[in-house]
Image: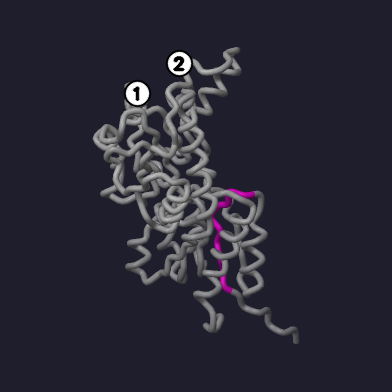
Amino acid sequence: MNAAAKPSRRALITDIAWPDDSVERGVLEAAGFEVALAPSSDEDILAAAAEGVDAILTCFATVSERVIRSSPTLRVVARLGAGLDNIDTAVCADLGIQVTRVPDYCVDEVATHSLAMALALWRRLPQYDAALRSGAWGTDPRTLPVRRLSSARVAVLGRGRIGREVGRRWAALGVEVTDTPVDADIVSVHLPLTDDTRRSIDEKALSSMRPGGVLVNTGRGPVVDTDAVVAALDSGQLAGAALDVFDAEPLAADSPLRSRDDVVLTPHVAFYSQEALVELRRRAAESVVAHFAGEPVS
């Protein structure tokens, strides 16, 4: 008689932002998991795909109450990222489902991206680039004024792992680092998204900065009031804004931000490096395996 097939747990990967699921699948299958990748992030499809799974791994897809409750065997939801905005954590808590994340995989990358964006705006690099391409040479009204960095005051809002590293790097450049936008020349946003922080970078916050300041957001898009940013750019209160995250993603094709040379835009990629991506995927999958370590497979 043939030996019975080894039983396995089941894991659903809701979505990936990279070419394949080989890293996640390699970790999970080695631990005895049967792994499936959902064909889309549609809630109906995810709810059907999640039936009977023991674990869900998600990148950007919304893991709603309906998706969570579709599997009575669900024990862990792992976020392939640092934030938990797309997971109904309250329902998970009610059902005793563990939620994991990888909060420190991209500290170096986001800190580097944030400073690069801020320095590009401080030195008016987008305007210099546009001016040169249009035939200008040297300074002109689009590239002025540029002030000495050492005289700047930088507000780092949010002092988690990334915010602390950003603050450390700015301090190493010899500038004054604060935790309030009041009288700041550069504001670097690293706040989590909560009811209190949503659109907290608004007209009042921006108007408290020194005129001609720079705003950078590599945290959560809805923390910043985009309309207030555009108004501050138009008035000159802001000399530039750099955004890697937005209220709705991808950024709308008709967004007024796209046509401005006083704005630097990147498509939610501050987290990215080859090394960070592999680390993220491996550690998220390992968090699932660790949750079940030592438990018998049933």
In the figure, 92 relative to 214: above or below?
Answer: below
Image quadrant for the C terminus? Answer: bottom right
Residue 177 falls inside the magenta stretch: no
Which region of the structure is painted magenta? 9-18
Furthest residue to the top? 135
- Residue 154, horizontal then vertical, whole percent: 37, 43
Going from N to C along the chain, the mark reached first, 1 or 2, is 2
Q: Left of 218 or right of it: where is 9?
A: right
Residue in the image at 42% along x and 47% along y: 219
The image's mark for residue 141 is 2
The mark tally for this picture is: 2
- Residue 148, horizontal then vertical, whole percent: 44, 33
Residue in the image at 44% along x and 46% along y: 174
What is the three-letter code of the residue carrying label 1?
Answer: Gly
Q: Residues within 10 Å of mark 2 (few under 14, many from 20)?
A: few
Q: Left of 238 or right of it: where is 19?
A: right
Instruction: Give 139 or 103, whichever is nearer the viewer.
Output: 139
Q: Left of 76 or right of it: where is 153?
A: left
Residue in the image at 41% along x and 44% along y: 175
Furthest residue to the bottom? 1
What is the three-letter code of the residue carrying label 2?
Answer: Pro
The image's mark for residue 48 is none
The image's mark for residue 236 is 1
In the figure, 175 relative to 87: above or below?
Answer: above
- Residue 43, horizontal then vertical, whole percent: 46, 50
